Amino acid sequence: FFSTGHVMPHFVLLVEAKGFSPFRMEVDVNDFEELIDALEKRIGLPVQQVLYYDLDFQEYLPLEEVEELPLSGKAKVKVKSETLPTLRELQQTISCLQQQLVASQEECQCLRAQLQWWEQKPQQQQ
């Protein structure tokens, strides 16, 4: 039961995520799950872990070790996400798929030729 004065914690986050230059993000979230959801939406990738800079300890701690979200304020987070494939990985995947495509087209032509042979063959009584 919230008093009418309940406000969602408002954060200004400085986010570091691999593959992205650090960016600022403002969020209103009630808990860590909402924070992770907001981060996933922003970077468009599943988040594996969030490290939260704890001012008391002066170090980054995994979210699961942070007792609770402060009510508001500025926070620094490092996001470990499933990384975007590198350009090289993308190129390799594409060329691999193209080779598979060529192979299936050749196989398809071969099967069509067999099919035609059967269709043109005079029907034998079974």
Image (cartoon, rainbow, N blue to C red):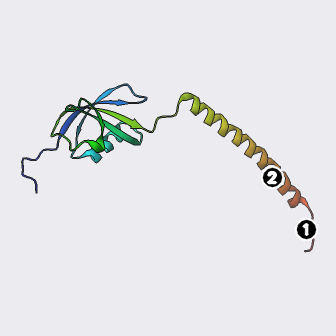
Q: Is residue 54 left or right of residue 82?
A: left
Query: Residue 40 is drawn in which quadrant?
Result: top left
Q: Position of residue 112 (x, y in %)?
A: 81, 52
Nearer to me, 54 or 36:
54
Q: Is residue 57 left or right of residue 119?
A: left
Question: How far apart are the alpha carbons under marks 2 and 1?
Answer: 18 Å
Q: Outermost residue toward the top?
A: 21
Mark 2 Cα within 10 Å, few/some/many (few <14, many 20+)?
A: few
Residue name at image x 25 percent, y 42 percent: 66
Residue that label 2 marks: 112
Q: Position of residue 83 (x, y in %)?
A: 46, 35
Q: Outermost residue toward the front?
A: 57
Residue name at image x 43 percent, y 29 percent: 19
Q: Position of residue 118 (x, y in %)?
A: 87, 60
Nearer to me, 33 or 5:
33
Of badges 2 and 1, the one in the foreground is 2
Give the secondary structure at mark 2: helix
Which amino acid type is shown beneath numbered disc 2? Arg
Q: Outermost residue toward the bottom?
A: 126
Nearer to me, 33 or 65:
65
Query: Residue 52 is drawn in which quadrant?
Result: top left
Which label is found at residue 123?
1
